[in-house]
């Protein structure tokens, strides 16, 4: 039943016998040489062995190991959820999150409008998101039931958020009670005020690293945009630019407050999209902005009044003069003083905030940095404690605080008493929206701008900030972007 050879072809056919179907078992061709017949007669097991050896050698020769970097990166990627968080500091130093103690964020909650912006930054700094904070505790310090309900819902959405219930009914101004009930010994705490609206990407790792490198310090503070003291410093570092408030509301198309507008509206934050400031007479003359020098009271200057906001939800515009006329702008009146102009003048605050947004767009945060380590020593002067790193024991060991001003005690009195300095890490930057004596800030469009920046640059698709969260809480003001 074997098929005959076709001599016109240069190969042998395989047999079609039902029991034999493979190489070497077909009959030899008539022209097959004697050596070939001898080879054909070899035991097929030897041939199979030789073929296998040659195949193995071919595989070994062609093998090339993966580069070590690729192999390591694959391992790290596969175990990323279990990886120890790390950060690269501003000076290029890589650091790992400490593991011998917890790093806990603590937020005294009382202002929903600003916390709705800050929350994106808080979430990004959790260990579960690659940050340094093991958890964030929210201490309710408000009696507003709507805000409390909003916080309760938010806390349920993030497993590392925790709401701290105080024993007192409602909110309290007794910081002794707040600290005693919300702080646990042995851990490092990052105290975070709820009116921060921007944080530099490595602000918290910078604070932690500086606190560990300087155990002699009592506390390490972030450098605030809108600070009673650091604004004076930042002005002289060249981080603040020439801005004035716009005189009249801009004339915009009906769709200008929709998604596409970059100069004014709920998605606007870039300074480059703003028009250049023009004087009121249109002749380009620089005029001093009339200021209202308050005495520490929270009374708001009426819209349109001397020193008050020109219109509700107004914006500030750049002079674009290479800061040649900056001495005629509000920042020139800043003071290095806990209760000075930088504390109560809302115009100084607004100019600093718009300057920050310009520096962010241009990648110029280095303008805020100082020295080799980035440290500014307060030398026992009072400083703002809106974002600080401090050991729990240094708080608990000094309770009860004498007086209701925890900022004075933590930044000045206790450090002086214990001969331990308060340090400001200028590479840990954060934007503090307003002091209580700066209510006019809510008549700027800055809160909307910080929301727009966060939604575009920080928040994930799952936690975009609803525009309605930025509606003003002041019923006398015009409605914001809702």
Image (spheres, rainbow, N blue to C red):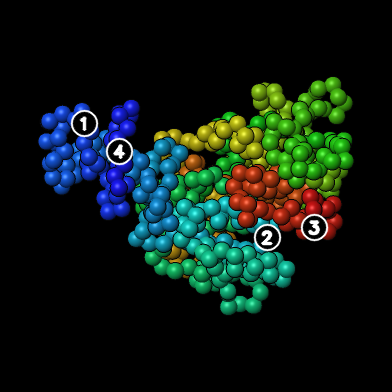
Side (left or right) of 16 relative to 461 = left
The residues bearing labels 3 and 1 have C-alpha atoms spaced at a distance of 107 Å
The residue singled out by tag 2 in the image is 111
Mark linked to residue 117: none
The residues bearing labels 2 and 3 have C-alpha atoms spaced at a distance of 12 Å
Q: Taking 108 as reference, is 288 above or below it?
A: above
Q: Tags 4 and 3 in contact by the CB under 8 Å rule?
A: no
The residues bearing labels 4 and 2 have C-alpha atoms spaced at a distance of 96 Å
Question: Along the polypeptide, which appears first: circle 1 or circle 2?
Answer: 1
Looking at the rendered image, the disc whose residue lies closer to the viewer, 4 or 3, is: 4
Per the image, label 4 sits on a secondary structure element best described as loop
Q: Tags 3 and 1 in contact by the CB under 8 Å rule?
A: no
Q: Which residue shows up at 68% across the image and 48% down it?
A: 451
At which x and y percent is residue 314? 80, 42
Question: Along the polypeptide, which appears first: circle 2 or circle 3?
Answer: 2
Residue 37 appears in the picture as rendered: yes
Q: Which residue shows up at 51% across the image and 72% down it?
A: 181
Q: Tags 2 and 3 in contact by the CB under 8 Å rule?
A: no
The residues bearing labels 1 and 2 have C-alpha atoms spaced at a distance of 100 Å
| Quarter residue 9 falls in | top left
The residue singled out by tag 1 in the image is 30
Question: Along the polypeptide, which appears first: circle 4 or circle 3?
Answer: 4
At which x and y percent is residue 220? 46, 50
């Amino acid at each position: 039943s074997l098929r005959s050879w076709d001599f016109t072809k240069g190969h042998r056919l395989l047999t079609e016998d039902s029991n034999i179907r493979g190489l070497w078992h077909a009959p030899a061709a008539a022209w097959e040489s004697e050596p070939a017949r001898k080879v054909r007669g070899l035991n097929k097991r030897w041939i199979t062995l030789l073929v296998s050896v040659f195949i193995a050698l071919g595989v070994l020769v062609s093998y090339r190991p993966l580069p070590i970097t690729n192999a390591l990166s694959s391992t790290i990627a596969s175990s990323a959820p279990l990886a120890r968080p790390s950060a690269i500091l501003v000076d290029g130093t890589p650091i790992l999150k400490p593991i011998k103690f917890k790093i806990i964020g603590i937020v005294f909650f009382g202002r929903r409008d600003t916390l709705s912006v800050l929350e994106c930054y808080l979430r990004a700094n959790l260990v579960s998101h690659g940050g340094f904070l093991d958890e964030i505790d929210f201490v309710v310090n408000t009696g507003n039931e709507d805000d409390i309900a909003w916080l309760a819902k938010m806390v349920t959405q993030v497993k590392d958020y925790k709401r701290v219930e105080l024993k007192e009914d409602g909110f309290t101004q007794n910081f002794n009670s707040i600290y005693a009930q919300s702080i646990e010994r042995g851990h490092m705490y990052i105290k975070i005020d709820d009116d921060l609206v921007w944080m530099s990407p490595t602000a918290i790792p910078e604070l932690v690293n500086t606190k560990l490198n300087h155990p002699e310090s009592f506390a390490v503070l972030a450098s605030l945009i809108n600070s009673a003291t650091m604004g004076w410093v930042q002005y002289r570092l060249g981080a603040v630019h020439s801005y004035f408030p716009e005189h009249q509301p801009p004339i915009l198309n009906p769709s200008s407050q929709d998604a596409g507008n970059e100069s004014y509206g709920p998605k606007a934050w870039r300074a480059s999209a703003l028009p250049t400031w023009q004087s009121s007479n249109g002749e380009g003359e620089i005029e001093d902005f009339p200021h209202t020098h308050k005495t520490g009271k929270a009374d708001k200057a009426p819209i349109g009044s001397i020193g008050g906001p020109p219109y509700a939800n107004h914006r500030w515009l750049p002079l674009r003069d290479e800061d040649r006329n900056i001495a005629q702008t509000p920042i020139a009146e800043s003071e290095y003083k806990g209760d000075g102009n930088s504390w109560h003048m809302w115009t100084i605050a607004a100019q600093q905030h718009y300057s920050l947004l310009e520096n962010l767009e241009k990648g110029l945060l280095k303008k805020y940095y100082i020295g080799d380590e980035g440290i500014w020593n307060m030398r026992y002067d009072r400083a703002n404690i809106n974002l600080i790193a401090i050991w729990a024991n240094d708080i608990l060991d000094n309770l009860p605080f004498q007086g209701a001003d925890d900022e004075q005690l933590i930044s000045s009195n206790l450090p002086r008493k214990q001969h331990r300095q308060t340090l400001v890490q200028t590479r840990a930057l954060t934007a503090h929206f307003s002091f209580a004596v700066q209510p006019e800030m809510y008549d700027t469009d800055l809160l909307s701008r910080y929301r727009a920046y966060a939604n575009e640059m920080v928040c994930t698709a799952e936690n975009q900030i609803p525009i309605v969260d930025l509606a003003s809480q002041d019923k006398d003001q015009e409605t914001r972007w809702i």
